[in-house]
Amino acid sequence: MKTLKLITVGVFLFVSSLMHSQVSVNVNIGVPPPWGPVGYANVGFYYLPDVEAYYDIHASQFIYFSGGKWCRGAYLPGPHRHYDLYNGYKVVLNDYHGSKPYVYFNDHKVKYHKGYKGKPQQTIGKNPKHHSDNGHHDNGNHGNNGNGNGNHGNGKGKH
């Protein structure tokens, strides 16, 4: 009788181990967006001078000022909802590692004014609005033909 119980338990464990399924979830937390600039895999934030907003790469959220406070959202607010993220300039905040880059907003706003163009940028992915592929990935951000000051990866405005 004891042997029968051991065999039953053994069969049960064997069958249950065969039925055990492995679940794999790929959430892409902390992956730069396809419109992000190439070459900056280990950064947390971009500053978008044209819309005076930030993008939190780890949370996949925009940070913008609205109604007297800083807000987070999956999309830019209404007035900027259709902003072309592929062609707009992104200032890479290499040296900021906190969670509130807007504490430096006054510095960023002065140094990276609306219309700011630093060094030319190539995006990680292709712009889905442009279907022709001639082998070039030129997004039009040429600044001063590459001779602009750029931000050299210094998000706090220090060179």
Image (cartoon, grey):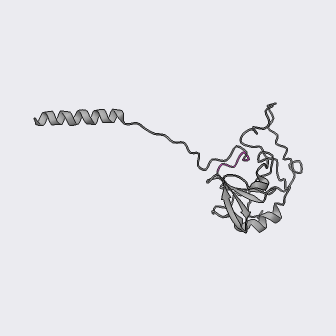
Which quadrant holds residue 11? top left
The x and y percentages for residue 68 are 73, 69
At x 80%, y 57%, the residue is 49
Of the 4 image quadrants, the one containing the N terminus is: top left
At x 78%, y 68%, the residue is 106
Residue extending furthest toward the left:
1
Type of secondary structure dominating the magenta stretch: loop
Residue extending furthest toward the right:
144
The x and y percentages for residue 13 are 27, 36
Question: Which of 4 and 106 lies nearest the eye of the viewer?
Answer: 4
Residue 13 to residue 66: above or below? above
Image: magenta residue range: 36-41
Question: Which of 39 and 75 lies nearest the eye of the viewer?
Answer: 75
Horizontal side of residue 57 vs 116, given as left or right: left
The x and y percentages for residue 128 are 75, 37
Per the image, is 39 magenta? yes
Residue 16 to residue 110: above or below? above
Which quadrant holds residue 12? top left
Per the image, is 78 magenta? no
Horizontal side of residue 34 vs 11, given as left or right: right
Question: Which of 86 and 148 lies nearest the eye of the viewer?
Answer: 86
